[in-house]
Image (spheres, rainbow, N blue to C red):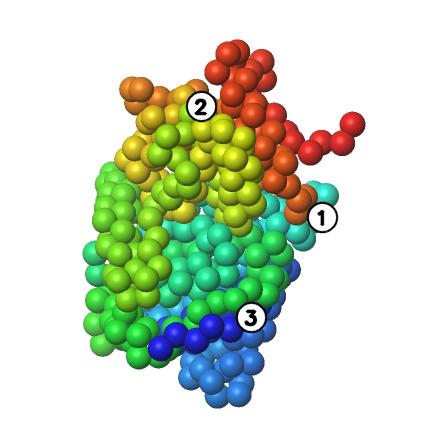
Amino acid sequence: MSKRVGMEVSVALTEAVKLAQVDVIAAYPITPQTHIPESLAEKVANGELDCEYICVESEHSAMSACLGSSAAGARTFTASAGQGLELMHEVLYVASAMRLPVVMAVANRALSAPLNVWGDHSDAMATRDVGWIQIFSENGQEAFDLTLCSFRIAEHPDVLIPVMMHLDGFHLSHMVEPIFLEDEELVNKFLPPYKYPYVLDPDKPVTLGAFTPPISYTEAKKAQEVALCQSRTTIKKVWKEYGDLTGRYYNPVESYCADDAEILLLTMGSFSETATLAVDKLREEGKKVGLIRLRLWRPFPFEELRKAVKKAKVLVVFDRCISFGGPGGPVSSEVKSALYSSTPKPRVISFVGGLGGRDVFPQDFENMLNQGFEALKKKPKEEFQMIGVRE
């Protein structure tokens, strides 16, 4: 039986890690994910969790240790955020290319300079091409559920790809919410013991991730791309199995009041819940608006997105990261690319906001949706608009 408790989201996430019975944790504290390794260290110290906790000197070292433990057949977890995620950046490519199913929670944070420890999606977007599966949670329950699902997805024999589970720094990581914690019996039924099929064995030495000349590097990258794209099938299957056990279902793209909407708003992460308030208010005014929530960032859900927006006239995309010198935010760019060859397709207009932890209120989303109606009559002059900029 599940148990409903009030708990900080970061700590609830560590309850999922404990239920997953991880073998190795290698993590380095950095705001706003510090409560995750702290809570796990306490669980190991007081005997709640039987695993090896590796104290490292940096995030680069943390991910390097995760490579070794995962390759040796250990269920492995870590966490990071912001500058820490960037410090381990080069090692992230190694984990995905070597098909090591590490699970990492990322409490998303702005990147310097200027120094800012509050949340936005700059760090997530900086790592979008590292070859990891990337999933976004919207609230504490989702952070708990999707952490468990991440282990099942990453370790599935048809996948064997590391997973980042994103949660917004402070706006989600430090919030206390009511969360259903599943019991050990259910989790054991859902998440079988980890059996990595390519364990490094001193008695059977092999080389992994070795030097590759031009004659074979392209083929290695092609195989990696195919594997990541094919993981979509398993991701959806795992989410369906989890939903059948708990009643909480997840999908790559999720809709709210979108069936008859002329104007759709697309969001990712915790601000999606704020956006529903704007949708509800405008619906009460008789305006046909709706919300699209992008849960799966990598591999990108092309088919599901096209299906979700095909009836809309305008799609308003909200980014919490700016792509400097580009057409706005990375999510907007990807959405436009995904819809380029679609017929019919909505007009896409782009907004960037919530940077460095700046709040975005329901009235801000109302304004974005109303500008979607204006875009029906006239194409915006600018490629994108930054919201909340003080004059």
Judged from the image, the secondary structure of the residue bearing numbered disc 2 is strand
Q: Name the spot of residue 63 as percent of width and height, x first.
A: 47, 62
What residue did someone put label 1 on? Answer: 115
Q: Residue at x 49, y 28 (%)?
A: 287
Tell me the quadrant of the picture where the C terminus can be found: top right
Q: CA distance from mark 2 to mark 3?
A: 39 Å
Q: Who is closer to the viewer here, 56 or 384? A: 384
Regarding residue 150, the answer to whether it shows in the image is no
Regarding residue 135, the answer to whether it shows in the image is yes
Numbered label attached to residue 7 = 3
Judged from the image, the secondary structure of the residue bearing numbered disc 3 is strand
Residue extending furthest top?
A: 378
Judge whether 8 appears above or below 329 on screen: below
Q: Earlier in the sequence, mark 2 or mark 3?
A: 3
Residue extending furthest right?
A: 391
Q: Name the spot of residue 112 as percent of width and height, x first.
A: 67, 45
Q: Residue at x 55, y 70 (%)?
A: 7
Which picture quadrant has residue 366?
top right
Q: Give left or right: position of 250 versus 333.
A: left
Q: CA distance from mark 1 to mark 2?
A: 36 Å
What residue did someone put label 2 on? Answer: 314
Q: Name the spot of residue 51 as percent of width and height, x first.
A: 43, 80
Tell me the kind of residue under disc 1: Leu
Q: Who is closer to the viewer here, 266 or 82? A: 266
Tell me the quadrant of the picture where the N terminus can be found: bottom left
Q: Earlier in the sequence, mark 1 or mark 3?
A: 3
Circle 2/circle 3 CB separation < 8 Å: no
Judged from the image, the secondary structure of the residue bearing numbered disc 1 is loop
Tell me the kind of residue under disc 2: Val
Q: CA distance from mark 1 to mark 3?
A: 29 Å
